[in-house]
Image: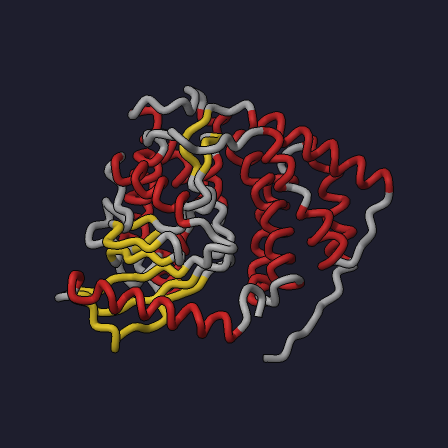
Amino acid sequence: MNSVTESGHDSRRAALERWLLSIASQHQLDLSTLATASSDASFRRYFRLDAGTGTAVVMDAPPAQEDCGPFLHVTKLLADAGLNVPAILAENREEGFLLLSDLGRDTFYQAVQAGLDDSRLQSMYRGALGALVGMQQASTQGLQAFDAQRLLEELTVFPQWYAQKHCRVELNEAEQSTLSDTFGMLVADNASQPRVLVHRDFHSPNLMVGVSDDAPGIIDYQDALAGPITYDIASLVMDARTTWEEPQQLDWAIRYWEMARAQGLPVGEDFASFHRAYEWMGLQRNLRILGVFARLSHRDGKHHYLDHIPRVSTYVRQVAGRYNAFRPLLRILDKLENRQVATGYTF
């Protein structure tokens, strides 16, 4: 396993059940229904159980690896802004357990994979765009800055984990210099944008199908920062888990831009300039994701993330091929992907 041992999981499950037993009567919990709901790329796990006439979700965040504090803090910021986020029903920060209201079982990703007619898809995503505009009007009090230094640090996973570890390519001095120049150009542009609350993974796996399309549930926001205004729209339209072709990307980006302008958000009066800005932000994000997905496989044994690398690479090439400034980057990508070694895993 990548995070904790099987025995560690067993001991945490026992501790979780003890805590739930202590609050069971208060929240009408049926412990016999406790079942795994999901896990994510971190050390967190989620469970679901019956609670009264509905269900509740339990977050298991081992304190040695995860701090519940940021999740609780951002939950309040988003709830105060009127967003549909889980209510905190009970908390045990010492052991790293939270009892949350259940926003539903289906993410946007699951709904899209199951098949949706286009009218329902568009309705859901218009709701998500509205939620994004609302989120960007939330307070950023207490959030760290997603500044140039942090943006640059996040890109180090690309040469280390994607190029060297996954593609098994040692970049020469000139290529390393090209990457450094490219990273510097991206970071300078992205760090100069107005700052808002940035979810950092505002895409289909973290949006829940709500009772109303106008109020999708939002989850997995504990890593939020105060950062570039184009980050989350780039995340949504260049979804690392779901392929959206350029016409659809553009349609949603225009709708977002119009909504944001109407609410007085600083997105500029020229859509062409905004389009370039979010594409450059998307390029930075997707270079990072290539490194992160490679690391999740090679370091943490989560090999299913490799399934998404071709999609993310396509997004990278979409942007890099549009701007002359990134032609040297394209040549590096050609070298990496032509020499990539395919690794098979048996499960």
In the drawing, does residue 73 fall left or right of residue 247? left
Q: Residue furthest left?
A: 53
Height in image: 222 above or below 225?
Answer: below
- Viewer-side residue, 235 vs 34: 34
User: Residue 172: image x %, image y %?
Assistant: 86, 44
Between 268 and 293, the residue placed more toward the observer is 293
Residue at (65, 75) in percent of width and height:
345
Along the line of sight, the residue nearer the viewer: 82 or 29: 29
Quadrant placement of the N terminus: bottom right
Q: Residue at x 25, y 50 (%)?
A: 87
Position of residue 293 in the picture relative to residue 78 (left or right):
right
Side of 190 relative to 92 (left or right): right
Task: Tell me residue 288's x, y (percent).
Answer: 61, 46
Residue 95 in sight here: yes
Which of the image's four quarters has the C terminus? bottom right
- In this picture, is 255 found above or below 24? above
Picture residue at 34% right of the left edge, 24% below the top: 261
Of all residues, the one furthest to the top in this rendering is 269
Query: Which of the colour schemes (rainbow, by chain, secondary structure, one colour) is used?
Result: secondary structure
Residue at the limit of the structure toward the bottom, as seen here: 347
Image coordinates of residue 205 in percent, x first then y, are: 41, 56
Picture coordinates of residue 117, whole percent (x, y): 30, 59
Q: Is residue 247 visible?
A: no
Q: Which quadrant holds residue 184?
A: top right
Rendered view: 142 above or below 124:
above
Instruction: Please give the name of the residue rendered at 69% of the width and 31% of the height, measured from the top-left corner.
Output: 325
The total of numbered circles placed on residues is 0
Write down the quadrant of residue 257 in the picture.
Answer: top left
